[in-house]
Amino acid sequence: MQTSDPFIQIDNVRRAFENSIALDGVSVSFERGAFSVLLGPSGCGKSTLLRLIAGLDQPTAGVIWVEGKDVTALPPSGRDLSMVFQSYALFPHLSVAQNILFGLTVRRTAKADMSRRLAVVAQMMGLSAFLDRKPAQLSGGQQQRVALARAVISERPICLMDEPLSNLDAKLRAEMRVELRALQQKLRLTVIYVTHDQVEAMTMADKIIVMNAGRVDQVGTPEQIYTRPASTFTAGFIGTPPMALFDPVDLAGGPVPQVRQPHVIGLRPEDIHLSHSGPTARLTGVEYLGADRLISAQAGQTAFIMRTPASAPLPAPKFRFGWLAASASVFDATTGKRLP
Ligand code: ATP
């Protein structure tokens, strides 16, 4: 069950390397039982933050709290958490059962207890039939499940995951997203999940932390991040295709908000429609997606994409377009920050 009490708190954490600043003053909290996703482009500092939470690395400054206790200096073994990585890190010479039990064996757990927990976890993860196999005799998805089973069997309340699905093909990845989310909810795990894949973040997260260049850009539910991006960065990072950013001049004749300071106007592809009035655009391309079409167009200096139902008429080479005033996002042209 998800509660709102902050379980893990990151307080003004900085991590500088010789030639780069991976984290530049990050403060964020993670709630108990929630699936939180660290999302951002390559190099934004996601993995560094996860490694600090795990205790695999130390911050240059700042504090990490777990349940009100300062754990900043504790080694990984002193933190009550499990980890799953992109490379499943399975031992090739050990059987599936031995791989799953590895951590418990190291901790000298009683044999009877191990067998009982193995049976439960293997059943839950659909691995009961494969326990005697070696990892090489499993598919990618099955290997990933072994890695998850190894984390789950530790019965630790926090599970850190770094791009755990990125080695799987698209279909399997989609299946595993659903499985992973169901597992997290069933076990009421507190998950902190690193990805650069916005679809993973949108489909699995209770809360998304969007990161950019070592800082937190926005924290919110998938819906908040999608409908009210806090900056042009997040607006452009979330959504396929992303929100188009218009120079207001290119929207003259449409329902533009009255804003004094220099600004840009963001519109999602599905919020733009063909219209009898409004600004004029030039058709530059059509992409058929089955249920929808993506229409590429140019209005003045702004290139944009609109999504229309495949059953809707195709626009003429020159067409007019409109949108609902309420669907527009407005950002400061200089800072890129959302204007209320
Ligand atoms: P990716 O999705 O590519 O893994 P990321 O968001 O996880 O990216 P990090 O791996 O946290 O990013 O790296 C953040 C920045 O810190 C990068 O500029 C990276 O080059 C730098 N960095 C990370 N680890 C080290 C290190 N051990 N030594 C020096 N620089 C590092």
Image (cartoon, helix red, strand yellow):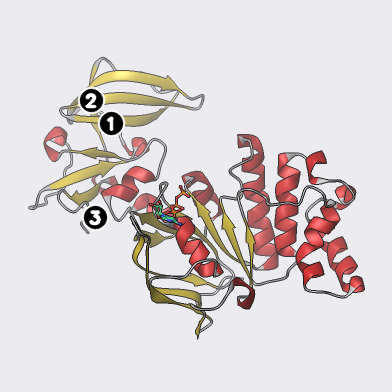
SS class of the residue under badge 1?
strand
Q: Quadrant of residue 209?
A: bottom left
Q: Are marks 2 and 3 in contact (CB under 8 Å)?
A: no
* Marks 2/1: CA–CA distance: 6 Å
Q: Position of residue 162 (x, y in %)?
A: 56, 54
Q: Position of residue 338 (x, y in %)?
A: 24, 55
Q: Are marks 3 and 1 in contact (CB under 8 Å)?
A: no
Which residue is at a point 54% across and 74% down the rendered structure image? 3
Q: Is residue 276 left or right of residue 29?
A: left
Question: Which sits in the foreground, 183 or 58?
Answer: 58
Q: Which residue is mark 2?
A: 298
* Marks 3/1: CA–CA distance: 19 Å
Q: Position of residue 137 (x, y in %)?
A: 82, 40
Q: Which residue is mark 1?
A: 304
Mark 3 is surrounded, within 10 Å at the Cα level, by few (under 14), some (14 to 19) or many (20 or more) other residues, namely many
Q: Is residue 229 left or right of residue 177?
A: left
Residue 325 vs 97, above or below: the answer is above
Which residue is at a point 87% across and 46% down the rendered structure image? 133
Label of residue 338 in the image? 3
Q: Position of residue 201 (x, y in %)?
A: 50, 51
Q: Amino acid at mark 2?
A: Gln
Question: Which sits in the foreground, 134 or 266?
Answer: 134
